[in-house]
Amino acid sequence: MSAPETAAPALKEIFNTERLQHIATEMSAVYPAFKAKAFLKHANDGLAELSVMQRMARVSESLHAVLPLDYEDSLDVLRELAPRLNSGFVSMFLPNYVASYGSHAFDTSMEALKYFTTFGSSEFAIRHFLRSDLERSLERMHDWTQDENHHIRRLASEGSRPRLPWSFRLEAVQADPQLAAGILDRLKADESLYVRKSVANHLNDVTKVHPESVLDTIEGWSLENKHTAWIAKHALRSLIKQGDLRALTVIGAGGKPEVELLDVKIEPAVVRLGEAITLSFVVKSTVAEEQRLVIDYAIDYVKANGGVSGKVFKLKTVVLPGFGSVVVGRRQVIKDFTTRKHFAGGHGVKVMVNGEVVAATAFNIIAG
């Protein structure tokens, strides 16, 4: 008999009692007068009910509660602690400490965030300074774009994202993306993939509110640099999925697709929740010229009220030779997520090439 499947531990368990003990042990090593028992009592109080971000904040609060030092001296101790921690994510309580207790010491706090980000990330903490002192914070982050360390360069882009997940929105940057545009321009050809992903995600955030601004920016870039071209493609991914002609043109797929689709099918045509469907078809060129094609598909999900809500999924981007063909397929498990619930009924499926719907099919979800 096979062993029963066990659920993965909740993300918040990264700050469990064992991890708190690790932090206390390492703090005692760098600061022998550390009140470890008092720290652990404070940090463990009600821990089970706290989310991962609340637990991270609790560690900062607990350190502040037991450290008898002023802010600058506390930072000296925490700087020694940083390289001793056994998790990059856990180390994010250090910049959280800066955000919570360092607003009065801008220059000292900026240097601390710059240092701590090399061990995990200061992306959440820097946003508190952006909200309270936008101009000075952006100026400092602009300087960070030239740093030799890619963690610090990334912080300039990631920390200024208008819609950073797990954090509050930066209303000023969301309203005027040009405020952070100089940071992104300096990083648009960065050699680090870590940094380029952040720049692309920042720009993709902006497309949710100001798509034309992002398109204007990217159309003004030279995409001959492979790093810049990579950022452009990934920054425009949401617009590309929506079939935006300007976005498709940027990546060389703005032309009308001269193709026909053959053998379009979904198997099986009827499924229950937890089962999988396989979409497959052949894309065949009908012209002699080479074509760059972005191939996607959309499912019209049935909602609880009987209406439908469409979601686009990426398939592939291909360069199709004249009169050539390519077989395309995708298997997808039909299961519930926190962001999507499935309901019984017919679900339409559309295949799109360069933003145009070129074929349609359907499958049925049944109860049981």
Image (tube, grey):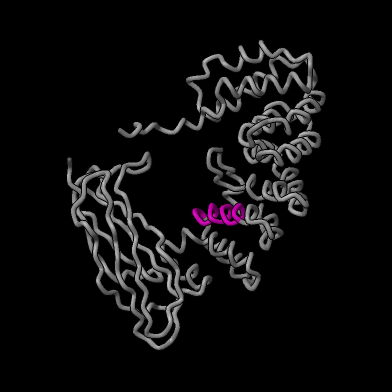
Q: Where residue 71 appears, x then y in whole percent?
A: 78, 24
Which residue occupies 60% across, 48% down?
A: 161
Q: Does residue 204 appear in the picture of this structure?
A: yes
Where does the image place residue 317, in percent across and percent down from the top left? 45, 69
Q: Is residue 336 left or right of residue 322?
A: left
Say whether residue 305 is magenta.
no
Question: Which of the 4 quarters of the picture holds residue 188?
Answer: bottom right
Quadrant that contains the C terminus = top left
Against 319, is 15 above or below? above
Q: Which quadrant would residue 121 be assigned to in this image?
A: top right
Dividing the picture into quadrants, the one containing residue 185 is bottom right
Compared across the picture, whether 62 is left or right of 293 comes to right
Q: Is residue 205 magenta?
A: yes
Q: With respect to residue 305, does 312 lie above or below?
A: below
- Magenta region, residue range: 197-209
Q: Is residue 2 above or below residue 247?
A: above
